[in-house]
Amino acid sequence: MSQDKLHEYLGTMLAVNNAFADRASALLTVQTLSSELVSLNSRIEKLEVASSKIFGGDKSRMRKIEELKEAIRVTENAKTCADREYERIK
């Protein structure tokens, strides 16, 4: 192999390695955001069950539920962007 071919090969392998690293990073982001959504939904469910046991509801729990719903909205938007980025890289 000539030196030029070797340099070309090494450059290509570096690009391939970087592409795989970018793909792995994007997938990890998608998985992390998916897990966060599951966690947020679980917390809302638990708060709703606890709040339903109190006559008239619990204002602090209801406020927390609303905060968590906003966090879900933001996280869903981030996950949508992460999904797009992952698909672009893939």
Image (cartoon, grey):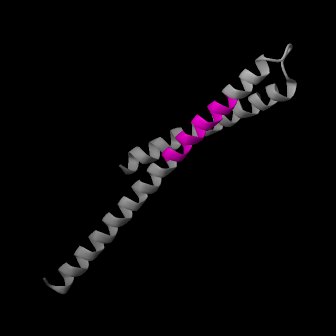
Q: Is residue 15 magenta?
A: no
Question: In this rendering, is residue 83 above or below 73?
Answer: below
The spot of residue 52 in percent (x, y) is: 77, 17
Residue 73 image-quadrant placement? top right
Asked if the magenta segment contains residue 40, the reply would be: yes
Q: Is residue 12 left or right of residue 48?
A: left
Split into 4 quadrants, where in the image is the N terminus?
Answer: bottom left
The chief SS type of the magenta part is helix
Q: Is residue 89 above or below residue 3?
A: above
Q: Hey, which quadrant is residue 7 in on the image? A: bottom left
3 or 60: nearer the viewer: 60
The residue most toward the bottom is: 3
Residue at the extreme left of the image, as rendered: 1
Identify the residue shown where x is 27% and y is 76%.
Answer: 10
Residue at horizontal 63 percent and vertical 31 percent from the top: 42
Give the residues in magenta: 30-44
Q: Relative to 86, does residue 56 appear above or below in the rendering? A: above
Outermost residue, top side: 55
Residue 83 located left or right of residue 59: left
Q: How many marks?
A: 0
Q: Position of residue 11 (x, y in %)?
A: 29, 74
> Where is residue 75 drawn, in percent x and y?
61, 39
Q: Is residue 80 left or right of residue 19?
A: right
Query: Residue at the location (36% across, 60% down)?
Result: 19
**Quadrant housing residue 21:** bottom left
Instruction: Between residue 46 and residue 77, name the one nearer to us.
Output: 46
> 44 or 7: which is nearer to us?
44
